């Protein structure tokens, strides 16, 4: 009877309200998917659910009172517990770039991948350290400003020259922006917090690459100065010890034509949402 009463009392405004709330939780679930907060959130929901079932099944009034008053404490504790994840979420939303206008053409993406791979192979043979960042949908202007502006085409020769150990620009990151051009060299990137690192003996380049992939959706290519090994980071993960063939395959999947063709619906929704927020913020600044 209560279900029938609830269905009969639904109004168009109530339905829209429910759908908006569901959309908010749907969007949050895709932003936190794959992060450490998922396990923590699952544990909190499990504990609260068990306590609710026990208090209702055995009519434990004191336990129910404790649970009801604990909701206020949880409202304050959740932002503290999930502070790193909330910070990264706000950073991603705030740095969202203009997805539809900035994305380079698929042919240009394929050429950039080939140039980066050629440069990485030769740098690996010479044991010259390198860190190359490929911007995708999240704007990296904040980090581009920390380096030396270049604004030139991507070529293996330029990358080899920049990362030559005796040049002034080799100690830092090269950032290739959303238009497919080298935006800056010697840029400073954020270091990883270290929570998700499985290998403790990582150099500064690798930690910076992981840190960049944690706060943005950028793809980073690293060449180790000590071993010459090539690695790629994306989404806070490090894929190490890559041979040239596998490096090309991964870059095509993360950055090339395969990336744009194989994007899932949730990823397209996130990109569209980021673009919409970026346009709205830009409109506010102009007014």
Image: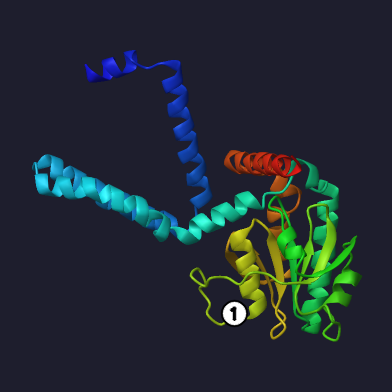
Determine whether, in the image, residue 33 is placed left or right of residue 104: left
Color encoding of the figure: rainbow
Could you say which is closer to the camera, residue 203 or residue 125? 203
Q: Position of residue 167 (x, y in %)?
A: 86, 82
Residue 214 coordinates in the image, percent (x, y): 59, 62
Residue drawn 72% across the image and 58% down it: 140
Q: Is residue 127 above or below residue 274?
A: below
* Residue sitting farthest toward the front: 287
**Residue under the image location 21 percent in, 16 percent down:** 1
Q: Quadrant of residue 22?
A: top left
Q: Residues within 10 Å of mark 1 (few under 14, many from 20)?
A: few
Whether residue 223 appears in this view of the structure is yes
Q: Position of residue 258 (x, y in %)?
A: 72, 48
Q: Residue furthest top?
A: 8
Horizontal side, residue 71 vs residue 278: left or right: left
Residue receiving disc 1: 202
Label 1 residue SS? loop
Residue at x-position 43% and y-position 28%: 18
* Residue 101 point in image, percent of width and height: 79, 42
User: In which quadrant will I find the C terminus?
Assistant: top right
Q: Total marks drawn?
A: 1
Horizontal side of 43 relative to 270 (left or right) equals left
Q: Residue at left 64%, top 40%?
A: 268
Residue 234 visible from this viewpoint: no
From the viewer's side, name the closer residue of 26 and 144. 144
Quadrant of the image occupied by residue 204: bottom right
285 relative to 36 in the view: left or right:
right
């Amino acid at each position: 009877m209560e279900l029938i009463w609830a269905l009969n009392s639904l109004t168009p405004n109530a339905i829209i309200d429910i759908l908006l709330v569901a959309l908010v939780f749907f969007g949050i679930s895709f932003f936190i998917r794959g992060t450490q907060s998922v396990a923590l959130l699952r544990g909190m929901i499990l504990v609260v659910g068990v306590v609710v079932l026990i208090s209702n099944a055995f009519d434990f009034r004191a336990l129910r009172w404790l649970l009801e008053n604990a909701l206020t404490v949880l409202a304050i504790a959740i932002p503290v517990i999930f502070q790193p994840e909330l910070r990264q979420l706000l950073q991603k939303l705030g740095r969202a770039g203009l997805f539809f206008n900035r994305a380079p053409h698929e042919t240009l993406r394929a050429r950039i991948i080939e140039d980066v791979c050629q440069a990485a192979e030769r740098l690996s043979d010479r044991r010259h350290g390198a860190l190359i960042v490929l911007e995708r949908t999240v704007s990296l202007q904040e980090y581009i400003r920390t380096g030396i502006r270049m604004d030139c085409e991507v070529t293996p020769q330029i990358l080899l020259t920049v990362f030559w150990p005796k040049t002034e620009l080799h100690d830092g990151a090269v950032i290739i922006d959303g238009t497919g051009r080298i935006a800056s060299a010697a840029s400073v990137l954020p270091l990883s917090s270290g929570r998700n690192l499985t290998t403790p003996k990582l150099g500064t380049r690798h930690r910076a690459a992981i840190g960049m992939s944690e706060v943005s959706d950028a793809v980073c290519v690293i060449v180790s100065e000590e071993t010459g090994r090539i690695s790629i980071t994306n989404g806070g993960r490090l894929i190490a010890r890559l041979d040239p063939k596998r490096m090309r395959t991964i870059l095509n999947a993360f950055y090339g034509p395969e990336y744009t063709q194989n994007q899932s619906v949730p990823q397209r929704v996130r990109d569209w949402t980021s673009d919409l927020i970026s346009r709205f913020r830009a409109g506010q600044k102009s007014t």
